[in-house]
Amino acid sequence: MSEIPNNLKYSKDHEWVNIEDNIATIGITLHAAESLGDIVYVDVSSLNQELKQFDKFGEIESVKAVSDLFVPVSGKIVEVNEELESNPEYVNDDCYEKGWIIKVEITNLNDLTTLLDSSEYEKII
Amino acid sequence: MSKTIFYEKHLDNNAKIVDFAGWDMPINYPLGIIKEANTVRNSSGFFDVSHMGRVEIKGNNAENFINKILPININSLKIGSAKYTLLINEQKEIIDDLIIYRFSDYFLLIINASNTDEDINWMQSVKDKEVEINNITSETGMLAIQGPDAIKIFNSISKNGIEDLGRYKFKNILIENNDVFVARTGYTGEDGVEIIFNLEFAFKIWELLINNNVTPCGLGARDLLRIEAGLHLYGHEITKKSNPIDIGLKRILESESSEYINNNYIHSENIRKGLFSMTGLLVTDRGIAREENEIYYKDLVIGKVTSGTYSSTLKSSIAIGMIKKDFNIINNTVRIKVRDKFLNATITKLPFYKRSKK
């Protein structure tokens, strides 16, 4: 059983979103981290860029697989978790806290309505 | 799907199960591939390798038969010793790589799970009636216990049963009145043993290892460790079409016997003119090079990756590749095409990892 905090929003691509004012903190869910296995690289290619909802913003790679990362809300990527460059295992060990990946300045709050809440996300995994 | 005797143990230990050559096998336990690999490098771990084929070659003509089908110098294979070798058919296709063990009056071959049926069918087709081939895979279990502490721990479990056992030697010992085959071999670059036992003893030996703090590890860690150790995996570094010299195995083509079916081939000019060679690639950019990724020197494709992983020992992405011989120059920089980007890599001598001998 994967832990799914109920204060977060989720995308079908297994990203989580935490909203504070107009800033969305984004990471991948425990379910995603467990499916990937040991993560060794988290690469965000689009710092300071304006992205549309569900655009690719980077890649996450484990010993066995690589996966694209998609931004669950439109906006500008204003911060990247630099700790992950030397400690990518934070995503496996603590995906909802130390393992956050980017912060996005939200441009369209309506995007949030298309995301899932914890009980909806639980049904798709 | 086939299951080993340990399948329930894997489930009990929350392993992630994958299909490996038609077997339900653990790729990793909750500890994860990297920590499992580190445990084997730093202390000790054990692997269920019961899926590997175990075949006895018996009968009056067993020795002649081995001489006929394997490129080994049979006189240098003493009773109680093992050798790594290749099974090459009449079409010069490598159908497997294997380890042969010599008993006083028969031989044991440990072969790849993925090739077990093909190997046995081919051997049946070239044997005479004085040779008996017994597949004992399903009647036995097999574990590999590996790591710097593995010998010490297994010696204690076996009440000093392997005190005098040298590398690539084997013996049969009794553990709690069960007959156990113990070989000082492995596939991780660490010291250790591989053991074979009757099914009735399987859960007991699992328990003894757990109680001695040996960590169960999955096939993911095993693959990572063998890549670090520069060891071949059939289907990756070795294929039917491989030239044994290209893949760095000239040293094992030792037979001088005219009885060997490929005697002419292994001593021919032709085999010495391989175009490719196997090499290590230390990836200096972020990202893992995967099997089949093309390797470039400037704008020229010079080869392909055969295996790639993240080395937790070197803290770097590493790969093994087959490249055109003329380009295999140590310390040269090449580029590996991974999806839509290029990763720089340095040509490196294999292995990436060599244990320090005590």
Image (cartoon, coloured by chain):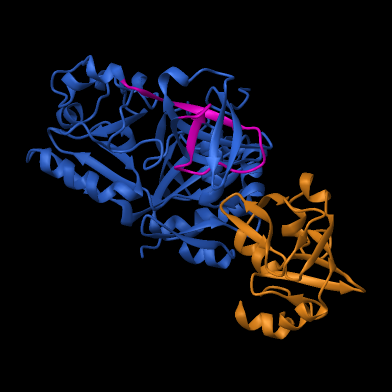
* Chain A, chosen colour in render: orange
Identified at 44% across, 49% down, the residue is B49
**Percent from the top left, x then y, of residue A87?**
78, 48
**Percent from the top left, x then y, of residue B288?**
59, 43
Depicted A109 relative to depicted B276: above or below: below
Q: In this view, does B330 lie to the left or right of B239?
A: right
Comparing B88 with A21, the one in front is: A21
Seen from this angle, which residue lies furthest left?
B129
Comparing B53 with B167, the one in front is: B53
**Percent from the top left, x then y, of residue B17?**
50, 62
Depicted A106 relative to depicted B47: above or below: below
**Percent from the top left, x then y, of residue A29?**
71, 68
Name which quarter of the figure residue A65 lies in: bottom right
Count of marks placed on residues: 0
Identified at 16% across, 32% down, the residue is B65
Name which quarter of the figure residue B62 lies in: top left
**Is residue A45 located in the magenta-colored stretch of the structure?**
no
Residue B275 shows up from this direction: yes
**Is residue B277 located in the magenta-colored stretch of the structure?**
yes
Q: In this view, does A59 lie to the left or right of B106?
A: right
Q: Is residue A49 left or right of residue B54?
A: right
Comparing B162 with B2, the one in front is: B2
Where's the C terminus of chain A, which quadrant?
bottom right
Q: What stretch is highlighted in magenta?
A: B274-300
Identified at 52% across, 28% down, the residue is B280
Residue A100 shows up from this direction: no
Identified at 62% across, 52% down, the residue is A62
Where's the N terminus of chain A, which quadrant?
bottom right
* Chain B, chosen colour in render: blue
Seen from this angle, which residue lies furthest right?
A21
